[in-house]
Amino acid sequence: MIKNEPSFLEFLKLDCDRKNFIQNYLNERNIETTIVTTGVKNHILVRFPQRQYDPTFKIKTIIAHYDRVPETNGANDNSFSVFMLMNWAEKLSKLPYAHNIRMIFTDGEETVGGIKNQGAFALAEWFKKIQIDKGDVFVFDCMGRGDIPILCQTDLPGNLSNAFRNNFVKLEKKTANLLASCSNKWLSLPTSYSDNAGFLAAGIPAVTISMLPSKEAENYMKLLMKTKAKIISDVFKPEFKEELKTLFPPTWFLINSHRDTPDTLTEESEEIFLKILEKISMLRTLS
């Protein structure tokens, strides 16, 4: 399991230079990377061979943020996702056919100051500037704990065009079908994080996929039904505080804390996550 691998434990160390670690890890496996700088944020673009891209089909952009809250291991948020993707990149690089995957490790997700201050927003603006803003965008965050894939619900702004909304709905449906094919159960839930928000704010449809233990997901569903919550802020209303303590996912209380350590990760998450990634690599949607 990844949480026991020495290289993963090195990645979790508080003094680890994570940008250099990712580049070196991939370079040792003959995978090239390029740094895309937006302001003070440094995003890592994985460069697969050109033969692995077919212009007939859509590009599928896979994203996971590699930054973390200072002085935390960030095992689930978001080291596990990054490490799984790095290992998957090695498999992708050896495929004899086109997979059309664009993989990016983003910087600045943990930045405070609103969506437009996050690294993903500036990156999405860069996408638009160089005209690579078409295709499907899948963001992975907190995938290391649990057995239930979660399609994070998104509260879309009201000023979006009908074309954008239609494209976003299509991507959500595609993602829902994908998750259903990878697990006996999946859920669409409002979450305490939405790393696709920067892309949405820049006008690029994107979904966030996460994971929860089944019991936590069931309790959270009960909380949502009791409170009739539609967005995460509804759950935090004063009248629901007692219910929150018992039914809100404990996994989310670990995020951004010193308790987000490798011992909280679960083995079944690896198997399900890998299935999701393999299904995405096989998706063929005409451009």
Image: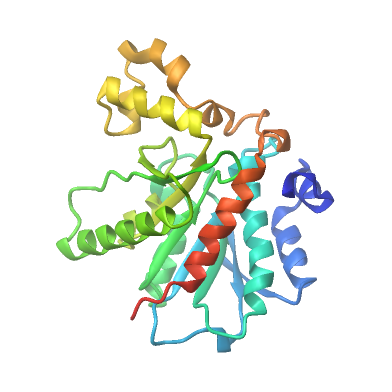
Q: Position of residue 176 (x, y in %)?
A: 36, 54
Nearer to us in this view, 159 or 26? 26
Q: Place residue 44 in its image quadrant.
A: bottom right
Q: Is residue 251 left or right of residue 180?
A: right
Nearer to us in this view, 103 or 182? 182
Is residue 26 positioned above or below 191 on the image?
below
User: What residue sits 57% from the left and 89% below the top?
Assistant: 51
Residue 68 in sight here: no
User: What residue sits 37% from the left and 72% below the top?
Assistant: 135
Q: Position of residue 285 (x, y in %)?
A: 36, 76
Q: Place residue 72 in its image quadrant.
A: top right
Query: Is the C terminus in the top left, top right, bottom left or bottom right quadrant?
Result: bottom left
Is residue 114 positioned above or below 249 on the image?
below
Q: Position of residue 122 (x, y in %)?
A: 44, 59
User: What residue sits 21% from the left and 62% below the top?
Assistant: 166
User: What residue sits 39% from the left and 81% below the top?
Assistant: 57
Looking at the image, which residue sits at the far front?
184
